[in-house]
DNA sequence: GTCTATAATGAGATAGAC
DNA sequence: GTCTATCTCATTATAGAC
């Protein structure tokens, strides 16, 4: 058993390198497609050493998920809407999508993640629930800021649609457009795409603020043509 | 090589049973999670026999994809909007979501599908492109029927959002709500959820028609509470 | 067409020296 | 902490009898 377990102890340079290399690898090729041999090679170590730091692939995935949770928590502390500053909200949204890209294998390879690390199931569930709550609060905040007018009967469906678009935007790029590597433009388009759900509910003031923040089509961020080739 | 290749010849009772059993199995447990042994057991035959009909798992998946394409083509022939009959459109949407449920492993296990049967990549791509075109035509039809008013600047984003929500609704139910088995209610909610994207753009006439068709919240199909437990 | 038995592969995991 | 060498095992695929 040795150690290398105590997270409070020395976090070990190699351990961190393994985690970083594997995250890249999983993102690029898919969690289930990467073998332990490749993982070790990517980290520049031997397979035996990999097993010294993480006895099983399961434990490595769990450790990565922990980092993911921390990154999410850090991003979530900022508030989406701060009074009238929609420009700041635009930056917030883009940061969110960038984070999702950095950890996209967790979004894309859901079934594999659960199969390899079943213990993550409740934590994944908590995270998705948090996301939906996050969206709810954002809508409330925009409403209270006098930016948005959503009929009560339509709020629930709007929240769900916003969650779906945000959670699956990354995979959409891959499936529909064959995007293999993200650019800043992809990230920005994700934010713009998500914001598109709210546009029909913006009132005069909100519309003006959104235009200033570059969140409206034709302003700053262009939407891709619907029939663009891959 | 024998035969069992010629699709024009006798389609073979066993072959059909294998395909049906495997579709169920893949849907329930995930394409990558099912072994050939399980596949044979589910079809009630020996492993050797399975390999007589499909030399490789890849070929079986390709055959299933062919059936999927046929089913999609059959559903796509009907037109989403027929004049003023939105009630009929509601039924159409529900049929669409039912189809997606019947073949959900193709939506959910995308990475695995491509890994096991790389030859499907272009066919998958064609299918997703068709879907987006389908949505575009539906919007045009609703606009021409005088039901919908979508600003030109917002159309492209609406199409993309509609595609995302429809393509990932099934996976959303699993991820977010832990739904393991579909009910008619889930299917209906998907249709209602998708239609929610169009609601803010409905004019008076469209709103009335939508209410009659049970596509508006509070009428017929209830949206789930945003914070519902799994 | 269908079976039983078996081979071939490649992944994850371990042992023990350094 | 790190390496090399080895083991176990599930899974895919094949051979050949019936």
Image: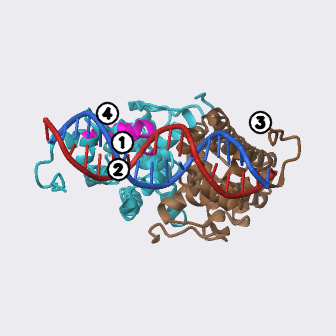
Chain colours: A cyan, B brown, C red, D blue
Instruction: Report the magenta residues as a range.
Output: A18-37
Q: Can you give x and y, in whole percent of width and height, for residue A110 in the image?
A: 46, 52
Instruction: From the viewer's perspective, tell me whether residue A6 is left or right of residue A135.
Output: left
Q: Residues within 10 Å of mark 4 (few under 14, many from 20)?
A: some
Q: In the image, which disc is placed on residue A42?
A: 4
Residue C8 coordinates in the image, percent (x, y): 54, 37
Q: Are marks 4 and 3 in contact (CB under 8 Å)?
A: no
Check the image and name the residue furthest to the right: B9
Give residue A159's position: percent from left, percent from top: 48, 59
CA gap between label 4 and label 3 equals 42 Å
Confirm or deny contact between disc 2 and disc 1 (CB under 8 A): yes
Q: Which residue is mark 2?
A: A57
Q: Earlier in the sequence, mark 1 or mark 4?
A: 1
* Cα–Cα span, label 2 and label 4: 15 Å
Separation of marks 1 and 3 at Cα, in angstroms: 37 Å
Secondary structure of the residue carrying tag 4 is helix
- Label 3 in the same subunit as label 2: no
Q: Which residue is mark 1?
A: A36
At 64% from the left and 32% from the top, the residue drawn is B122
Q: CA distance from mark 3 to mark 2?
A: 40 Å
Chain ID for label 2?
Answer: A
């Amino acid at each position: 058993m040795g150690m290398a377990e105590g997270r409070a102890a020395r976090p070990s340079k190699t351990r961190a390198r393994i985690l970083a290399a594997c995250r890249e690898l999983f993102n690029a090729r898919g969690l289930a497609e990467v073998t332990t041999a490749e993982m070790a090679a990517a980290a520049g170590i031997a397979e035996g050493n990999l097993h010294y730091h993480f006895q099983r692939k399961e434990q490595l995935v769990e450790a990565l998920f922990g980092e993911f949770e921390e990154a999410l928590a850090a991003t979530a502390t900022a508030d989406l809407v701060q009074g009238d500053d929609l420009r700041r909200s635009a930056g917030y949204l883009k940061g969110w999508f960038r984070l999702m890209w950095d950890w996209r294998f967790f979004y894309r390879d859901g079934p594999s993640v659960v199969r390899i690390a079943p213990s993550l199931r409740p934590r994944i569930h908590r995270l998705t629930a948090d996301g939906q709550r996050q969206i709810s609060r954002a809508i409330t905040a925009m409403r209270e800021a006098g930016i948005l007018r959503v009929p009560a009967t339509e709020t629930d469906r709007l929240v769900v649609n916003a969650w779906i678009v945000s959670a699956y935007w990354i995979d959409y790029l891959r499936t529909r457009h064959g995007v293999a590597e993200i650019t800043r433009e992809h990230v920005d388009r994700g934010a713009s795409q998500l914001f598109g759900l709210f546009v029909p509910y913006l009132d005069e003031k909100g519309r003006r603020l959104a235009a200033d923040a570059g969140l409206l089509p034709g302003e700053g961020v262009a939407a891709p043509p619907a029939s663009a080739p891959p």
